[in-house]
Image: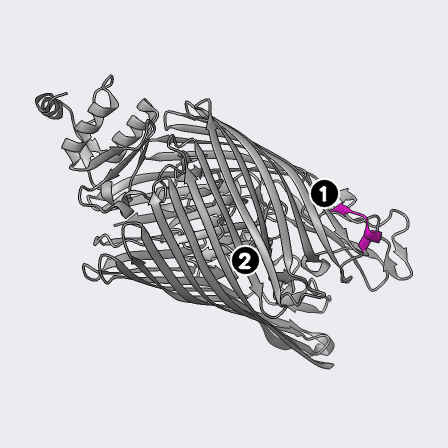
Amino acid sequence: MNVTILKAQTIQEEKQSLIAVLKTLERRYNIRFSYIDKTIKDKKTILPSDGLTIEDVLNILKNETDLDFQILDNRFVVIKDFDTPKVSVITQQLDEIIINNYLTKGITKLNDGTTTIKPETFGILPGLIEPDILQTIQALPGVYSIDETVSNINIRGGTHDQNLFLWDGIKMYQSGHFFGLISAFNPYTTKQVNISKNGTRAKYGDGISSVIDMQLSDNIDNKFKAGAGFNLINADAYAKIPLSKKTELQLSTRRSLTDLIVTPTYDQYFKRVFQDSDLTDTKDDNYSISKNEDFYFYDVTAKFLYDITKKDRIRVHFLNVNNNLNYDEQSTVNDNSEALNSKLSQQNLATGITYTKDWSNTLSTSAQVYMSNYNLDATNFDILNNQRLIQENKVTDYSSKLDVNYEVNHQLKFNSGYQFSEIGVSNLEDVNNPIFRSYIKEVIRSHALYAETSLLSNSAKTNLKLGTRVNYYQKFNLILVEPRLSFSQRFLNDFRFEILGELKSQTTSQIIDLQNDFLGIEKRRWILSNNSDIPVIKSKQLSAGIHYHKNKLLVSAETYIKYVEGVTTRSQGFQNQYQFVKDIGSYQIKGVDLLVNKQFNDVVSTWIGYSYSKNDYTFSTVNNGNSFPNNVDIRHTLTLAGTYTYNNLKLALGLNWHSGKPTTNPIVNNEMVDGSINYESPNSSHLKDYLRTDCSATYDFNISNNTLATIGASIWNVTNKKNVINTYYTLEDNDVVSKIENLSLGITPNVSFRLQF
């Protein structure tokens, strides 16, 4: 096609955004475009006529956009500025994207088993009107929360502390606000979230269940951007502020409105979080807790970007996450009135600095040092017993990392590096009556070396990542070698076969000593392995999957087996005959994840997901060494959902069902033996099935040329179903066995309003 014809078509066609044109061409020619976001931002072009060859189409786009379009093979096309060096051409997403708009817009499935979420372009999910990061990942197969919180996410049968949460490369020890109902990480400053359930990159240590890697924007685009909004729980604001051509400051803050205004959403959250805690336990007819509790949370993030040169960059990171609760206790015993203040605070403070250097078009290095500090403090007054209890749990994590990337070409890449960590964990208990004080502090220093090779075939049909991480724990003189594998093979054009495998370990875990620890609200405390009664936790996992994707239909099936050893009974939250037993054991889970996702013309997306798994404990002495169901052994999980997008309107409706959680009941007609509850076999019964229906809607509209507004509304648990999420038994003073039930969130409405500038 000659230049004259190109110009003629340009005159006749109306221009539209380049990204919209690219999406149309991807569907039309079954190809994938790879690019850096800022390269195509604000670019406009015509939509080339149907029937043209791909070469003619790319020539039109080159003339219209002044960008270079390079065909790597018959499927992938790289877009770059003509003066962009090679290292910037091969972007992170190159040849890796398997499925765009996975379930909803902004979620992408990659061919190494990783799922990527981009909150900035996020569509909508049932029950959510904002892109809450840790709520969103629960839409993925194999991910759920047994108690509806983001501070107890179970991925393939693991406990929450077995997930590695990284914020801009910094390990986080607190993940939730409102003690677990809201993600602690502001989605409006988070550029991308990478979730890996298996076949993890060798550069990641810890997190035997998963890695959830949250990344802020790392590029300076010299454009001011800001936004603010509120819902019935909190208000927030963020800004991306250019300071000069080489510097930028990213800021965000969020604070709850709960201490300023009481809303229906807060009422439901309050009932859910504080049920069965010291705040709602009246203990005695003459004893009451006043209703003037003071609860609030906030978070503040800041990132400073400085491009020293085109090849040298410095980034400074800061995050502060905080929850605070105060309430008064008072009694009228013996006609005397006394009031004392109990309180609970939870904070994760993180700061770090990263230096990146591009040595050439093929070699780059990145060095990072950070500090992550977690504090959980509680003061609890028991007036009836004239007792004051102080509890503290503190974690201080100092880490440094050096990461090296060498890219021979777009088909062959190497990644290697070194990480040093010093983690100190302390626990304090101080009682005034009777006088008792316990303070324990442990420190572990570790060194890790890792190396990984990525291979991509000429046709981009075969992808292989093979790596190894070697951890040395200085205190125990222990060396652990952890191979990692990710293999993907596309065949018959529309099918892909996948194998993932990994060995991993971690030295940090959370335990529960007593169910009323930390006022019964944040029961878990961090501890460190001592390589004896608290071993280093180790895991092995292997999975295989097959995926079919054509004409916006995805059919996916994945089976896996995971074995974890070194878990303690104290870390599993038993509330039966093993609540106070100390033992070491393991669990093994076998499962299958199935998903069918059909999209219709970028307007409707529907999906059905089903998971089956069998998760069993084995401890050395508990239950005579015989295996029994895990506390989070959910055999069947089913999700039905759909989203609808029309112009600026987005709607979502979904149903979540799973079989009941295992529980241990007292033996009928023989509930008591020798003054103790006489239980049946551990976890031999189940709660009733869980069922919840959610819906949500958002609408975008322009207030001015530079201001976009979004209003949203959602209802969690539309039918107000009373789901029992936990049951346990206590022995009352009159030797009566009492049954305690914890309920899920009831019908919970929420509305939001946002502005983007």
| Label 2 crowd (10 A; few <14 / some 14-19 / many >=20) | some
Position of residue 127 in the picture relative to residue 101 (left or right): right
628 is within the stretch colored magenta: yes
**Which residue corresponds to the image point at 30% horizontal and 59% vertical from the top-left?**
357
Indicate the quadrant where residue 329 lies.
Answer: bottom right
In the rendered structure, the answer to whether residue 627 lies left or right of residue 8 reads right
**In which quadrant of the rendered view does residue 721 lie?**
top right
Range covered by the magenta-colored residues? 622-629
The residue type indicated by label 1 comes to Leu
Tag of residue 687: 1
Identify the mark at residue 470; answer none if there is no mark. 2
- Whether residues under marks 1 and 2 lie with C-beta atoms below 8 angstroms apart, the answer is no
| Distance between the alpha carbons at the discs numbered 1 and 2 | 42 Å
Count of numbered labels shown in the rendering: 2
Placement of the N terminus among the 4 image quadrants: top left
Helix, strand or loop for disc 1: loop
Provide residue 2's location: percent of width, then percent of height: 11, 22
The reply, left or right, for residue 4 in relation to residue 301 is left
In front of the other: 655 or 508: 508
Q: Helix, strand, or loop for circle 2? A: strand
Query: How far across and how far down the image is residue 47, in percent?
Result: 21, 26
Q: Could you tell me if residue 695 is visible in this image?
A: yes
Counting from the top left corner in percent of width and height, residue 56 is at: 20, 23
Amino acid type, residue under disc 2 in the picture: Val
Residue 230 in the magenta stretch? The answer is: no
Left or right of 456 in this view: 575: right
